[in-house]
């Protein structure tokens, strides 16, 4: 066993409480996820703000994988680039791990790993995992899984994590499976006890109970989106598995039976169909939307590319449908298990011909829930596709959040006409000597009235198509008719602007520069603004939540001499769209974007802005 | 409607044939697809199906334009090339009491749409899935479709080097529960098959050899009227019986007539022609199809029927009312539940 | 027979020679195409500049269809909105036809059509087609086809079209089929003779021989593109039929055997495969491009949408491939037989993630030929997809053009390494202590060296993929590696700019305003500039032929107070991309776009600019 | 290479097994796909195929990652999900002397890739097309694939309501000329089948039941090792004979051994097990597959072989030299020809 090194540098021994980053380095498929989540949950239960990020390879077993917990007294949720504490369980990456440690950081490692020559400014704690494990009664086939709990125990001892909270976390995980709970907690306890007896603490990191998570939840964006959709009355989803979107439909499958089974009849108010591919998934979903169901699907880049043709049809034939694009790194298959915001311009211009899509961009798990229901409302109100752009970071990671909020507006179905409504509108139009037409703009807002199959009233039916059609859905190649139809679609999107989520802004007194961002970069930016302020750079901030842009956006840019547009892609796509829409303001915009698959860190943002501002 | 100078005869639900019509066809005169439209009209009229109870779907192609030309009073959606089945799947879930009729082409279903065609069969979505099969791409002016026979020569395309897709064989392989072949030049049988399909509780594939008179009707080609007339072999005489009470098999017919009951009390009556053929036997179906291929026959009739396989809806625990008519209260869980949900979030 | 009306208005009887528009209104599938083309060719052979446009429905038989010939002494090729002469063979549209006639125009109509009440400012010539036909010996099954030749004869008489040229045109069409030629010419003659005897000319329109087409050709853009590609050494195409692209691959099928069969061996140097759909067409073509074949395909909007995923792969895996997008009206199935320039922004941002495509935009059939070979060079030189954006108007219509020019540059295969080259580069790198890597940027221009399957040299192979990879094509999820890879792709596109076709500009003295356009709007704009000049509005003109934009573009905009961007779509897509690239100049850009399926006319452009300039 | 402490035995072209290896597998230990990689290596080594003569293709999935793990010295392309066949088609035209090996999954080929799978079979592109069939989506963590049996239950997905796609049946329906099924737990037969496939002049589909030990290996599921071991029935004992001169069928074996000659002088030797089965008979093939389905058997062996159907390249009149090696002179028609072309333009 390598002896624990003694760090002499004074600064390092000053205690760091509740403000650092722990990374677990393991091999995927080894069952470490439960252990890591248990630590996350225990910290949460101690009342300390935390967030958990999974950095995993695109394979199933045997490759390096990392789980990072940010512990942050102040409640910052963004990624930190350096670790304070690393739990190293993977021989292959142990050197790398050490590289990412801060000066004075801690490396806990399984002592059966070969320890290569190490930097000498860190604290090393070898952990006799195998030995401890051998003293426990664990069935052979689950031994490696349960062994992970030993490091949980050791870590708890080192960082002073409350064991009772660890137990609560395990109880949450194993639910009714008491024997599993006991066995796992036994392993935690064994690790904890071993460390108490054998390990001399030489590092300055620890946690201490707080009261900052009460009333909060820990959730991932995909579950939030699924739940929001369920509360939004979603009824149909055709879907096809793809990382990192899969867990969204899988959450639907999990939660729908619990929440949307009719109490009296025991019947489902929804249907979820796993399709044979994305072309079919979107086809089914659009079919359902056309049929009058609240319809949605979720996919990621490659799937979205495959949906381009069908979404063009939905745009032109005016079919409500919601598509969640949980973005990963592209182009092409790219980095399927890494995060990016690189689909924005594609989604905006998707499909041949003149198209335009309503895009919503949630920036937190809570907003994922909210946009879950809101997107369905907007799609039906405006009879058009709504693309909701989330990403892997937001969708698959664990975020501290205020609880989901019950929708504060009733379900909006838009201008759907059932038999009675149809009769009424027929009468209304009759007076004007007119007839109802599926694409007739009766209200002058670009939004026509629609009927759906099953409406048995004669005259309410129509034949939908992606080919040219007139106000009455009749086939038409007439030039004027075509032009009028497309112009109405533009008008409709103009009308829609009014109900789209407005951007969120936060001001700082005497701020001179602005920051615009969207989606999952929010926490890093929030933190960066504080860091910048400390350096004397005061910033205002606008988070865009929908496209087409509403008037608050140009106003914000106007009010600042310079505005940084911060995003996770190569080409600065949000900035591109802002430029396109507000060219007169473009000279005041600064691109600040990066695409390497990792969520942006506050440190990077701060550095970049500082350098640019000091230039 | 209202034009009383036309045919004023009505069916049992008081509708005239006129009520089942569509817009005037813009297909070529003599196109097989027009015959299909006509027989859909005839079948729906005869079965007293209200047009409001039908939804039509199609992809892209001359064949896929066809739904405009029948049942104007039904809802319909002319979707994307090759993607009709997915559209129909989603739409029919909205109201499963609706009868879905999908009309597609051999290009639409056997080429770009092969995947969706196969998968909708496998799911057994209740849908009358008619493929108007002319061995050619009509709407794009005469390229080979995948059902074109090997060595066929077409004007600008040269010689087709590949073996043809056999749509019925594909449906069989995909576990379709109703597989039939018909010939646009044999309207009576086509009509009976459509009637049976309309009462089948699952995907009913009808491969209709439907000649393209403009680009592909040379006598020696297997998708022409002439070839069909010459080579058609009905495997049986088929008639659809809306009410099985009515079936009386007289002595004379015994042994040569077989009744197959459908899910809803209706039946198919099958009269032997030549050999004994049992359309509920998969082995026989495969052999029959292979045989027809080898012997250059246009085999028509009900090739396979499985009434036991459950339709797609079955496993979804759907309510009696149409999903698309559920009131908002049924769609949004109650306020109280959210607290519980939040408590799960850890 | 309705008597020929006498027009008294003097102005109308002043002769119009070689400057008007003839439209044939027929029923599609009735065989009129040959007749109409014969007129076009005869006029061409008379030395008169002509262009022919087909305005046809998206069906096969029985619907109204129009063929318009513009006869233009000055050589203008754009669409005219009004007809001078109409040959009406379709009962259904005869009233409409009359509406499009200019004051004093001529309506020739088959006398078996019911003539509704007509405006009285036009000249009517009933044609006894059936009667004349009945006197000819024509086999029953082709009678309606041949009957069309009768109106050719009558028209020839009315307009003074040289009969010998008509005969030459027929001879071209029927080639060796002498009896067909005789029969058709017989019908022409019969019509001609009948008119000579029976028809009193009351209209001012006629043609007169010129010498303006010598050395010129009449061609459609799709054939030109196919031929250009053949001269560019294209070797593989996977394709799928779609209007209006189909005639491009069909021209390949027609011409390749004639031009690319090895004289000695009789073997083909190419392979064309009709795929099962566009996903497969592009897959095959990309496979071939990767395999070292000069590979291309052609499609239109819906097909392009389906190709988005695969083109993203080609962009990222760096596979050379050329895609001709012969645009029709979208979104969705739209108007399949009408023309537009609506796929530009989609093509630019196609596919999820950060992508960027080289786009070429030919503006004439001659350029279709040129870009046919050039696109293949550029794709291979830069190992990237090249999208060539044509449209229905350019691709399917008949254009007067200078002859195709033999490529003035040798075939460029880019940095392909065969066994010997590979050895050489290995040695070169060896000296530097390096190894060859598929994605290694040896020259610092962003363009790596590639090998192709069949290279038997050990070490030359690599495993291509759409997932993250390093310089050596090894699988990589490393953040820095990803970022570097994408940045190199940007650099590569920068490098490519140098060889992209520069914009074409034309100046007018003392011009104040600029016009930017691209593609098939060229002839209308050319003519509009003359019209505008006559009204005192002098314009400079820039035709963009490639994206990314080269430096000439901003320079042009800078040099004008105001620049109109003229295009055929709703959203002003070229202007959008210009705005994005040159936001500082955007305030000087004016959107002038229209999407109704019809090619723009000089009159419309002129009117729009006049109104705007006079405001 | 060069590492002489390893296996130094060489084959007839002087290569060691090492020369056929790929990168270390990142698949799960025990994954059936690893067995497939191993047998591809073994077959290529045994047949003295130079790795430089092979090109590898795949789609997306655990199975599609597999080509990284064999034949590092070959070119390869890991393409898009479901689109391997088209990629292979284009690439192989570049040099038809190359041997194409495509490796795909059941999701990759029977779900999203159904269309391309069927159409490449129909075209008879010379390609060894291996489908590593585990009844599940491995890489996306355990959803149903279309080959999953009806009523199968999976952790997060519930119960599979649909009938499974039978890959061999699909290949048959598509007129594939070489259709085999193997089991990753039966490496010897798999190897012989791969050898035969490598010498087949057309599309050779091998449906390999290849268990996913991580998400889908419960004993009762038909894609598990346990089930396979218990239910496997070889339809014959198959061996590939590289040089048919060598075949000596001794008296003892007569009547129980059959030789099928391949296009290149190699042969497949088939030894009867139980019944008489003629893999060149399509009728028998269909019946055998149906039978296996009904009787719950994992049927393995060469199910169908047609050596007469011409390979795709045949109709393209290709030169002897690889297309991708044609010099520029052969690609650009001579200057003079353009005048002629221009004269056509009217
Ligand atoms: C994505 C896409 N690709 C191509 C087309 C062009 N297209 C229209 S119809 C058609 C073929 C139709 O053939 P088939 O289904 O056999 O119908 P038919 O016209 O023969 O009845 C094609 C290729 C299209 N509309 N969409
Ligand atoms: C267009 C697209 N959709 C979805 C995915 C996600 N995806 C990756 S692998 C896979 C399934 C693979 O299943 P299978 O082919 O059976 O391979 P296995 O992993 O089981 O070997 C899916 C759906 C993708 N990469 N691309
Ligand atoms: S082209 Fe052929 S398929 Fe199309 S309408 Fe005419 S006959 Fe029918
Ligand atoms: S997840 Fe399944 S298919 Fe994928 S590597 Fe592991 S065992 Fe194989
Ligand atoms: Mg067809
Ligand atoms: Mg699988």
Image (cartoon, coloured by chain):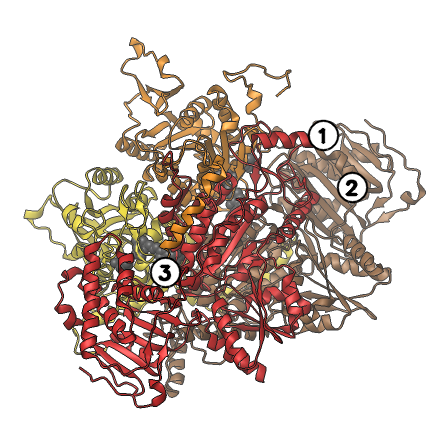
Chain colours: A brown, B yellow, C red, D orange
Report how far apart the C-alphas of labels 3 and 2 lie in the structure.
58 Å
Name the residue: 20% across, 50% down. B218
Q: Nearer the viewer, residue C279 or C288?
A: C288
Quick check: do tags 3 and 1 share a chain?
A: no
| Position above or below: D108 against B225 | above
- Visible residue check, residue D134: no
Judging by the rendered image, the residue that carries numbered circle 1 is C431
- State yes or no: discs 2 and 1 in contact (Cβ < 8 Å): no
Name the residue: 22% across, 67% down. C188
Report how far apart the C-alphas of labels 3 and 1 lie in the structure.
73 Å
Give coordinates of residue B234: x percent, y percent.
16, 47
| Position above or below: A585 against C458 | below
SS at badge 2: loop
Report how far apart the C-alphas of labels 2 and 1 lie in the structure.
35 Å
Judging by the rendered image, the residue that carries numbered circle 3 is B96
Q: Nearer the viewer, residue C32 or C262?
A: C262
- State yes or no: discs 3 and 1 in contact (Cβ < 8 Å): no
Judging by the rendered image, the residue that carries numbered circle 2 is A100
The response on whether ligand 1 sits within 8 Å of label 3 is no
Q: Which mark is residue C208?
A: none
Q: Nearer the viewer, residue A593 or A15?
A: A593
Q: Nearer the viewer, mark 3 or mark 2?
A: 2
- Visible residue check, residue B179: yes
Give coordinates of residue A426: x percent, y percent.
38, 81
**Dividing the picture into quarters, in which one does residue D294 lie?**
top left
Quick check: do tags 3 and 2 share a chain?
A: no
The chain letter under disc 1 is: C
């Amino acid at each position: 066993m390598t002896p624990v090194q003694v760090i002499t540098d004074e600064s390092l021994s000053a205690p760091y409480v509740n403000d650092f980053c722990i990374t677990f380095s393991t091999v995927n498929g080894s069952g470490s996820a439960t252990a890591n989540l248990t630590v996350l949950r225990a910290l949460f239960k101690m009342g300390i703000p935390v967030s958990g990020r999974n950095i995993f390879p695109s394979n199933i077993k045997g490759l390096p994988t990392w789980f990072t917990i940010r512990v942050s007294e102040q409640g910052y949720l963004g990624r930190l680039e350096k670790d304070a504490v690393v739990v190293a369980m993977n021989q292959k990456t142990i050197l790398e791990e050490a590289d990412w440690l801060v000066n004075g950081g801690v490396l806990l490692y399984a002592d059966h790993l070969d320890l290569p020559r190490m930097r000498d400014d860190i604290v090393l704690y070898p952990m006799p995992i195998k030995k401890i494990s051998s003293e426990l009664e664990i069935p052979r086939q689950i031994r490696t899984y349960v062994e992970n709990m030993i490091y949980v125990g050791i870590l708890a001892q080192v960082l002073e994590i409350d064991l009772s909270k660890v137990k609560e976390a395990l109880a949450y995980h194993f639910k009714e499976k008491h024997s599993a709970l006991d066995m796992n907690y036994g392993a935690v306890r064994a690790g904890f006890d071993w460390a108490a007896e054998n390990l001399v603490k030489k590092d300055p990191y620890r946690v201490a109970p707080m009261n900052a998570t009460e009333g909060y939840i820990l959730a991932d964006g995909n579950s939030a989106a699924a739940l929001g959709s369920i509360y939004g009355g979603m009824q149909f989803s055709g879907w096809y598995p793809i990382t990192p979107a899969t867990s969204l439909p899988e959450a639907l499958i999990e939660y729908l039976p619990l929440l949307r089974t009719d109490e009296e009849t025991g019947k489902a108010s929804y249907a979820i169909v796993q399709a044979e591919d994305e072309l079919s998934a979107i086809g089914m979903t659009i079919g359902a939307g056309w049929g009058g169901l609240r319809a949605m699907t979720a996919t990621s880049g490659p799937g979205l590319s495959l949906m381009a043709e069908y979404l063009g049809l939905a745009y032109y034939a005016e079919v409500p449908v919601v598509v969640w694009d949980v973005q990963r790194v592209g182009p092409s298959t790219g980095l399927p298990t890494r995060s990016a915001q690189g689909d924005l311009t594609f989604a905006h211009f998707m499909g041949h011909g003149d198209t335009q899509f309503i895009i919503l961009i949630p920036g937190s798990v809570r907003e994922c829930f909210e946009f879950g229901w809101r997107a369905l409302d907007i799609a039906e109100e405006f009879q058009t596709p709504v693309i909701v752009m989330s990403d892997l970071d937001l969708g698959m990671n664990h975020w501290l959040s205020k609880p989901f909020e019950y929708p504060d507006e009733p379900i909006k179905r838009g201008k759907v006409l059932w038999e009675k409504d149809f009769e009424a509108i027929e009468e209304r139009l009759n007076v004007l000597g007119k007839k109802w037409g599926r694409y007739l703009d009766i209200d002058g807002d670009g939004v026509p009235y629609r009927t759906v199959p099953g409406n048995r009233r004669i005259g309410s039916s129509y034949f939908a198509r992606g080919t040219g059609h007139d106000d009455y859905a009749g086939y038409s190649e007439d030039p004027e008719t075509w032009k009028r139809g497309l112009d109405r679609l533009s008008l409709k999107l103009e009308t829609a602007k009014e109900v789209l989520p407005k951007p969120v802004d936060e001001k700082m007194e005497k701020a001179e520069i602005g920051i615009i961002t969207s989606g999952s970069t929010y926490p890093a930016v929030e933190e960066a603004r504080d860091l910048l302020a400390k350096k004397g750079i005061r910033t205002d901030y606008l988070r865009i939540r929908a496209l087409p842009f509403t008037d608050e956006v140009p106003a914000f840019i106007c009010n600042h001499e310079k505005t940084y547009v911060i995003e996770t892609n190569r080409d600065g796509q949000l900035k591109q769209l802002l430029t396109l829409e507000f060219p007169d303001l473009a000279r005041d915009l600064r691109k600040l974007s990066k695409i390497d698959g990792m969520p942006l860190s506050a440190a990077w943002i701060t550095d970049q802005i500082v350098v640019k501002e000091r230039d | 409607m209202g034009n009383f100078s036309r045919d004023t005869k009505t069916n049992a639900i008081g509708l005239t044939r006129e009520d089942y019509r569509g817009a005037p066809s813009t297909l070529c005169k003599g196109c097989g697809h027009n015959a299909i439209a006509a027989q859909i009209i005839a079948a729906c009229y005869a079965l007293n199906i209200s047009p409001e109870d039908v939804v039509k779907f199609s992809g892209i192609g001359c064949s896929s334009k066809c739904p405009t030309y029948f049942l104007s009073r039904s809802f319909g959606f002319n979707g994307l090339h090759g993607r009709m089945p997915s559209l129909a799947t989603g739409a029919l879930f909205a109201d499963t009491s609706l009868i879905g009729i999908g009309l597609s082409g051999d290009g639409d279903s056997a080429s770009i749409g092969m995947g969706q065609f196969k998968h909708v069969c496998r799911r057994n979505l209740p849908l009358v899935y008619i493929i108007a099969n002319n061995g050619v791409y009509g709407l794009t002016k005469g390229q080979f479709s995948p059902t074109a026979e090997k060595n066929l020569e077409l004007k600008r395309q040269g010689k087709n080097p590949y073996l043809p897709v056999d749509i019925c064989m594909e449906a069989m392989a995909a576990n379709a529960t109703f597989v039939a072949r018909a010939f646009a030049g044999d309207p009576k049988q086509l009509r009976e098959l459509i009637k049976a399909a309309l009462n089948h509780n699952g995907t009913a594939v009808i491969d209709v050899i439907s000649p393209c008179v403009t680009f592909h009707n040379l006598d020696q080609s297997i998708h022409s009227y002439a070839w069909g007339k010459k080579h058609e072999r009905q495997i049986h005489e088929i008639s659809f019986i809306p009410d099985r009470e009515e079936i009386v098999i007289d002595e004379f017919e015994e042994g040569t007539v077989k009744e197959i009951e459908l899910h809803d009390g209706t039946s198919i009556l099958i009269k032997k022609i030549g050999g004994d053929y049992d359309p509920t036997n998969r082995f026989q179906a495969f052999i029959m199809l292979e045989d027809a291929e080898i012997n250059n026959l246009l085999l028509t009739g009900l090739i396979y029927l499985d009434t036991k396989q459950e339709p797609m809806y079955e496993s979804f625990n759907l309510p009696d009312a149409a999903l698309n008519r559920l009131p908002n209260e049924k769609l949004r869980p109650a306020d109280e539940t959210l607290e519980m949900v939040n408590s799960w979030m850890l």
